[in-house]
Image (cartoon, rainbow, N blue to C red):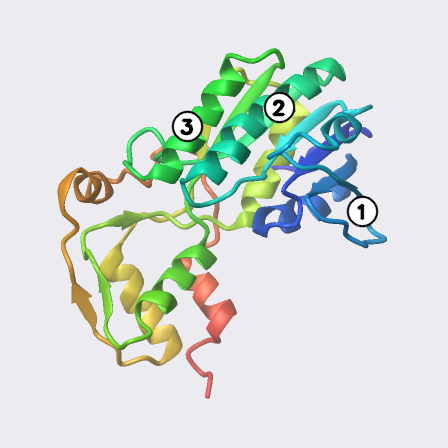
């Protein structure tokens, strides 16, 4: 992945305070973009131009998109209930309409690999948001990324609090580093609207039991894997690689490298 030149392109980043947003903001500035960061609450950051706007109500959106050349839409409400519909689906529609009124030339939305295959309520809302953009008035791109390694790490820590690590050994995952996704997003902004969907994943497809073994070794943990076969369509899709992609190019940072950076190398005491 080569560097891109933003040439001063003015970009609004929604959800700028999240995991991906924290990787995206410095990447865009380094590449020469003029960045405006958006969040629901005021933030004080001398390195960024922060604005307050609420996708759930539309408050502040007109001012947030004013004068922008492109919008990088990262904001989301994970869950899958009414709040997710209000933010992810209706909020994306509000954002697209405001961007059209402001003359924005590109709306780039970050989604998740598998939203069209894996039957999870949250994913249905992400897919609906993609469809809003495809039917909307602003030239658009959707970039679907695979899961971040920190998400998998948090999942393993949360599910193993009582001892064993439960999970379906044959589920497939493909962790991708958010900083590499940020580079890809900068490239996509530089090349303009795709009017389509692009997928981007990590360098390795791992079985759940492989990921757990590496995680346990990095943490010096003796907690065993408790095999639990996921039932129904959800299990079938996850075992068939519903959260993975064969599209290239991919990121380069592996799960093992994430674990070494997070928990220390083999010589850690």
x, y (%) of residue 93?
Answer: 57, 22
Q: Mark 2 — residue?
A: 94
Please say if 220 is above or below 190. below
Asked if the residue under mark 2 is in contact with the one under mark 3, i.e. CB atoms within 8 Å, the reply is no
Please say if 58 is above or below 152. above
The image quadrant that residue 105 belongs to is: top right
The image quadrant that residue 72 belongs to is: top right
| In this rendering, the label closer to the viewer, 2 or 1 | 2
* Residue 77 in view (yes/no): yes
Residue at the spot 14% in from the left edge and 54% down from the top edge: 229
x, y (%) of residue 67?
Answer: 82, 23
Between the residue at mark 2 and the residue at mark 1, the CA separation in whole angstroms equals: 24 Å
Mark 1 vs mark 3: which is more N-terminal?
Answer: 1
x, y (%) of residue 235?
Answer: 18, 44
* Residue 5 in view (yes/no): no
Q: Mark 1 — residue?
A: 48
Quarter of the image with the N terminus is top right
């Amino acid at each position: 992945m080569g560097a891109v030149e933003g040439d001063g392109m003015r970009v609004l980043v929604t959800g700028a305070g999240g995991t991906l947003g924290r990787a995206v903001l410095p990447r865009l500035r380094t590449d020469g973009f003029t960045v405006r960061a958006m969040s629901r609450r005021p933030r004080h950051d001398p390195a960024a131009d922060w604005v307050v706007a609420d996708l759930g109500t539309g408050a502040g959106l007109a001012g947030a998109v004013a004068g922008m050349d492109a919008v990088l839409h990262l904001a989301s409400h994970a869950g899958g209930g009414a709040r997710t519909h209000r933010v992810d689906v209706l909020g994306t529609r509000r954002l697209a309409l405001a961007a059209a009124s402001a003359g924005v030339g590109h709306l780039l939305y970050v989604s998740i690999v598998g939203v069209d295959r894996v039957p999870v309520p949250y994913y249905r809302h992400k897919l609906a948001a993609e469809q809003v953009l495809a039917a909307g008035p602003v030239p658009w791109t959707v970039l679907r990324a695979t899961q971040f390694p920190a998400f998998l790490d948090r999942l393993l820590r949360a599910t193993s609090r009582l001892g064993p690590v439960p999970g379906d050994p044959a589920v497939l995952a493909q962790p991708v580093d958010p900083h590499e996704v940020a580079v890809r997003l900068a490239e996509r902004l530089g090349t303009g609207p795709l009017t389509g969907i692009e997928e981007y994943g990590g360098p390795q497809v791992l079985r759940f039991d492989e990921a757990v073994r590496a995680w346990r070794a990095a943490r010096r943990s003796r907690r065993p894997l408790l095999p639990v076969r996921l039932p129904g369509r959800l299990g079938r899709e996850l075992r068939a690689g519903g959260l993975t992609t064969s599209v290239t190019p991919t990121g380069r940072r592996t799960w093992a490298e994430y674990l070494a950076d997070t928990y220390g190398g083999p010589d850690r005491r």
